[in-house]
Image (cartoon, rainbow, N blue to C red):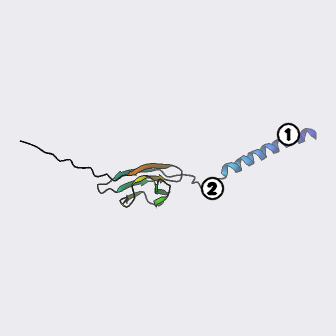
C-alpha cells in the first residue's frame, strides 16, 4: 500500500504543476493589445509652413497620432481606424507659439517619436551699400 501512495502523490503533483502552468499561459495582460499592426510614416513640412503626415498601415488595428508640447500637454490627437489602410493629415502649426514639440505615432505597442521645433526668424538689419565711381 505504501509503495502505491508515493508514486500516486508524485503523479498528482506533476498534474497540478502542469495544470497551473497551462492556466498561466492562457491569461492575457489587460490594457495591451496582443498583436499590433505594422505601419510606416512620413513627415515633412510644406511651403506654407504646415506639417504633413503620411501614414500607411495594415488593416485590423488602430494607430494613434499625437502632438504634444514640451510640458506634455496634448495639442492634437487623431486615431486611424481599424479598417483604414492610409491616412494623410496636414497640421497647421502657424498658431502655435515658438518652442519644442513632439509628434508621436503609436499602435499601442510600438511608438515612433519625431521632434518638431518651431522658431520665428528674427528680422535682420539690412546694411546699405554705398558705391563710388
Q: Quadrant of residue 93?
A: bottom left
Q: Which numbered disc flags the more N-terminal residue, 2 or 1?
A: 1
Q: Position of residue 65 (x, y in %)?
A: 46, 56
- Of the pair 131 and 26, the residue shown nearer to us: 131
State yes or no: discs 2 and 1 in contact (Cβ < 8 Å): no
Please state if 49 lies on the left or on the right of 111 as rendered: left
User: Quick one: label 1, few (<14), some, or many (20+) residues within 10 Å?
Assistant: few
- Quadrant containing the C terminus is top left
Q: Quadrant of residue 85?
A: bottom left
Q: Is residue 112 visible?
A: yes
| Residue located at (78% from left, 43% from top) | 14
Q: Is residue 59 visible?
A: no
| Residue located at (48% from left, 57% from top) | 64
Please state if 128 lies on the left or on the right of 25 as rendered: left
Q: Is residue 126 above or below residue 77?
A: above
Q: Is residue 105 above or below residue 1?
A: below
Tell me, for residue 96, which label it has, or none: none
For the view shown, which residue lies furthest in the top direction?
A: 3
| Residue located at (76% from left, 45% from top) | 17
Quote the CA–CA distance across marks 2 and 1: 40 Å
- Quadrant containing the N terminus is top right
Q: Which residue lies under the disc numbered 2?
A: 30
| Residue located at (31% from left, 54% from top) | 46
Q: Position of residue 26 (x, y in %)?
A: 66, 51
Q: Which residue lies under the disc numbered 1?
A: 7
For the view shown, which residue lies furthest in the right direction?
A: 1
Q: Position of residue 114 (x, y in %)?
A: 43, 49
SS of the residue under disc 2: loop
Amino acid at each position: 500500500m505504501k509503495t502505491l501512495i508515493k508514486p500516486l502523490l508524485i503523479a498528482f503533483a506533476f498534474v497540478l504543476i502542469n495544470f497551473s502552468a497551462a492556466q498561466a499561459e492562457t491569461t492575457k495582460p489587460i490594457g495591451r493589445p496582443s498583436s499590433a499592426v505594422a505601419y510606416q510614416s512620413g513627415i515633412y513640412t510644406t511651403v506654407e509652413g504646415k506639417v504633413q503626415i503620411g501614414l500607411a498601415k495594415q488593416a485590423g488595428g488602430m494607430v494613434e497620432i499625437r502632438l504634444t508640447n514640451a510640458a506634455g500637454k496634448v495639442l492634437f490627437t487623431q486615431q486611424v481606424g481599424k479598417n483604414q489602410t492610409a491616412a494623410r493629415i496636414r497640421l497647421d502649426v502657424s498658431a502655435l507659439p515658438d518652442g519644442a514639440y513632439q509628434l508621436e505615432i503609436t499602435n499601442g505597442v510600438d511608438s515612433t517619436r519625431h521632434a518638431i521645433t518651431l522658431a520665428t526668424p528674427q528680422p535682420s538689419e539690412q546694411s546699405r551699400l554705398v558705391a563710388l565711381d
